[in-house]
Image (cartoon, grey):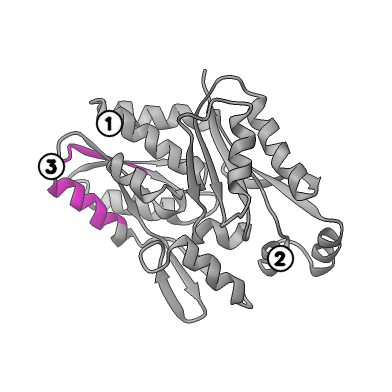
Amino acid sequence: MPGIRVITDSACDLPPALAEQKDIDIVPLTIRFGDEELVDRRDLTPKEFWARCATSPVLPETAAPSPGAFEEAYRRAASLGAEGVVCVSLSSGLSATYQSAVLAADSVKDTIEVRVVDSRSLTMGEGMMAVAAADVAAAGGDINAVVAAVEDMIPQQRTYAALDTLENLKKGGRIGAAQAMVGSMLSIKPIIEVTKGMVESESKQRTRSKSLRYLVDKVKEHPNIEYLAVMHGDAPDIDEFVDMLTAVVDTSKMIVGDIGAVIGTHGGPRTVGVTFSISK
């Protein structure tokens, strides 16, 4: 397998079929439910994760891949004949995943050149950067061209999500119990945004339907978008949301993916998100 190999981590939430089609290797994070440790998407599918969360009194915990897990992926790429590796990682502001990827790159420097790019993003925002990298690699781009494709995309990326419940923020200690209770009584639906590699509160909407319409309006604000993706945490109304988007923008190349355990732990069930890149 000549050329540049693209690697990312399982926080990217790329659908497995798309990752396979684009020849992207995914290094999994791990999820802990109490004493039980599970490998993301290998031991626990997104659907299984959401089913377990529904009956779990506490939030699961997530852990970054070890440097050894990345090293194994890099060496696998070398053994397949790759000329180099570009690894697109979960935002360094949210996880030690980037650090693990960098440490592993140093340990294989005598075997293969590895460049690690901090996506400054998460879920399908990160995933679509890996797809962009894979597209350049497939077109014959060298390691510098593949890295540049991702780095150029970072400031153009927009990622928003509508949370359906405040319960996960409460369990995770992000908001107090009283605040969560009042918010739930008032049907407050927080909108979050990924900005500068961190997750920030963007606005608060009243009712689910208003929060989803707000996301559609965010997409509509930008006429020239690329790498459009929708992600959701087992949301029963995801088809309705996709229809809402289709009515206002070109969704012919849009990807729809499941939010898995890594991001779902914090966002909670029925989260719906959208990510896209603004073309220059």
**Residue 235 part of the magenta-drawn span:** no
Q: Amino acid at mark 2?
A: Glu
Q: Amino acid at mark 3?
A: Gly
Crowdedness near tag 2: few (<14), some (14–19) or many (≥20) residues, C-alpha within 10 Å: many
Task: Assess whether mark 3 and mark 2 are in contact (beta carbons under 8 angstroms).
Answer: no
Tell me where residue 193 sits by quadrant: top right
- For label 2, the residue is 167
Question: Residue furthest toward the top?
Answer: 280
Q: Amino acid at mark 1?
A: Ala
Label 3 element class: loop
Q: Specify whether residue 84 is in view.
A: yes
Q: Residue at x 77, y 42 (%)?
A: 210
Task: Assess whether mark 1 and mark 3 are in contact (beta carbons under 8 angstroms).
Answer: no
Q: Nearer the viewer, mark 2 or mark 3?
A: 2
Label 2 element class: helix
Compare residues 133 and 84 and report the one nearer the observer.
133
Q: Residue at x 29, y 61 (%)?
A: 68
* Residue 243 image offset from top left, x and y in percent: 60, 37
Q: Residue at x 54, y 56 (%)?
A: 263
- For label 3, the residue is 81
- For label 1, the residue is 137
Q: Nearer the viewer, mark 1 or mark 2?
A: 2
Tell me where residue 144 sits by quadrant: top left
**Residue 75 part of the magenta-drawn span:** yes
Question: Residue furthest toward the bottom?
Answer: 35
- Residue 263 is marked as none
Task: Tell me how far mark 2 sits from mark 3, CA to CA.
Answer: 47 Å
Looking at the image, is mark 3 or mark 1 earlier in the sequence? 3
Task: Tell me how far mark 1 sits from mark 2, CA to CA.
Answer: 41 Å
- Residue range in magenta is 70-87
